[in-house]
Amino acid sequence: MSTSPRFPLLRREIGGVPVTDLARDFGTPTYVYLADRVQSRISDLAAFDCVRYAQKANSCLAILDVCRRENTLVDAVSAGEIHRALAAGFAAAGDPPPIVYTADVFDRDSLDLVVQHGIHVNCGSIDMIEQYGARVSGGDITLRVNPGFGHGHSQKTNTGGEQSKHGIWHADLPEAVARARHHGLTVSGMHVHIGSGADMAHLAQVAEATTGFARQVGSSITMVSAGGGLPTPYRNDDAPVDVAGYFRIWDQGRKALEAEFGHPVRLEIEPGRYLVAEAGYLVAEIRAVKRMGQNLFYLLDAGFNNLARPILYGAEHPMSVVPLDGDGAERPLVDVVVGGPLCESGDIFTQEEGGFVRTQRLPEARVGEYVVIEAAGAYAFTMGSNYNSKPLAAEVLVRDEKAHLARARQTPDDLLRGERIPAV
C-alpha cells in the first residue's frame, strides 16, 4: 500500500485552499499557516504538565491565539514579545506563569515590563539576577543553566557549551543561587536548552543534567523545563521524533526529584520550531527561468528578506511546484537552483552552510507558476527584513479550509513610516 510523501513535489492546495486562490487573494510572497497542524503538534506533547510555546519561532498574533486556545503557555525573549503575548490574550501572571521572560540580559524596556506586569523571569546571567533583585522584593525566579555542552543542526543554533553566550555557566550555579537568596528571591525553576534540532541522545543528556542542577539548588525547585530543540522533519525520509520516549526520560528524573523534595515538581516543555515549522508555507511566484552554464535557475519574488534560514546556516527546505495547467504529473524532474530577487549573490534558497550553491530536484516549471517553500513556519517570517526596501510578506491563517488574513503585506508608506529628512 503506497502512501503519499510528507513533502510532495507537486502541490495544488494548502489546507484545502487552492494555492492559486491564495496567490490571487493575498498576492505573493505570502506565508500560509495551518491552524490544525499547530493544534496537532501541541496535542503530541500532552503528556507534559505544561507546553510553553517559544514564540521567537513564529510570533504572529494568529499563531499565538491558536496556542492560547489550546491551553499552552508562552515564552518571551524581548519586550516586544511580551507585548505580543499580552495582545494575544495571555495573562501576565498566574500559576503556572502564563508568560515567562527568558533571556541572558535585561534591556531597560524588558526589565520595566516584567516589573510592571509581575511577569516571571528565567535568568540566563547573574547580572540579570542582580538587576531584577534591585527592583523586586521577594518572589521567585527560574535559572537557565549552560550545562557545558551543546548540539543542534548548525553551530549557529547551538546554545550550549563554552562558545555559547546562553545561560549561567554550570560551575557558577552556586553563586547564582547565593545572589538570588541575597535579594530574597527563591529559585523555583530549572531550565536547560542546548540547541535547535538536537538529536535524542543529546536531549537525553539534557534531562540528566537538569535533574542534577535541580538537586544542587534543592527543594525550592517546583518546576523543571525540558527546553526545546525537538527535531523537525525537513525531508521525506526524516524519522519523526519519539515524543513518548522523550517524556519517559524526563518523567523519570522528575519523579526522582519529587521523591527527594517531598512535593510535586511540574514538568514543562518549551517547543518552538516543533509546533509551527511544518504548519508554515511560503508561496512565491516564479518570475524568471534561466540557465547559467550548467545550472538551471528558478528565480522567485521571495528572497532571503522573507526566509533567511538558508543563507544563515544552509538550512534545507522541501519545495513544491504549483502548475497552472494540468496536474503536472507528466512534467519531467529537473535539477534547479532556486533563488530570489535581491541584489545579493547569497540570495539562494538551495545552498549549503558556507554559501555553497546546490540544486534541488523539482518538476519543470515556467514563469507565472508558483513554488511553495514548505516547512517554513519557524524562524522564517520572524527573521524577515526590509533589505532592498522590500515589504514584509503577508501572513494568512487557514482554518477549516478557509483562509484568513493574519497580517497585511507592508505598503510603500509602511516602509517609510518613522523616517524623516532632517531640516538643514
Image (spheres, grey):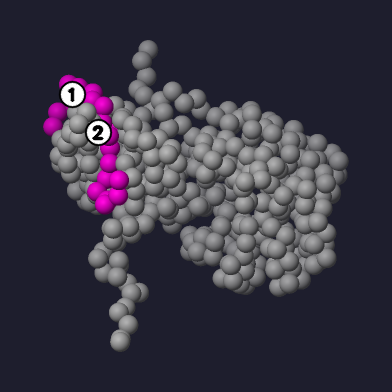
**Which of 146 and 263 lies nearest the eye of the viewer?**
146
Q: Residue 2 at x, y = what percent?
A: 36, 15
Residue ID at (18%, 34%): 291
The dominant secondary structure in magenta is: loop
Residue 120, quarter of picture: bottom right
Left or right of 360, for residue 192: right
Q: Residue 311 at x, y = what percent?
A: 39, 44
Q: Is residue 74 above or below residue 179?
A: above
Residue ID at (20%, 35%): 292
Disc 2 + disc 1, Cβ < 8 Å:
yes
* Residue position marked by numbered label 1 in the rendering: 331
* Three-letter amino acid code of the residue under disc 2: Val
**Which of 142 and 406 lies nearest the eye of the viewer?**
142
- How far, Cα to Cα, is label 2 from label 1? 11 Å
Q: Which residues are magenta?
A: 320-345
Look at the image and tell me whether residue 66 can be seen.
no
Q: Is residue 360 above or below residue 64?
A: above
Label 2 CA crowd tier, 10 Å (few <14, some 14–19, many 20+): many
Residue ID at (30%, 79%): 421
**Which of 42 and 337 lies nearest the eye of the viewer?**
337
Q: Residue 104 at x, y = what percent?
A: 63, 57
* Residue position marked by numbered label 2 in the rendering: 321
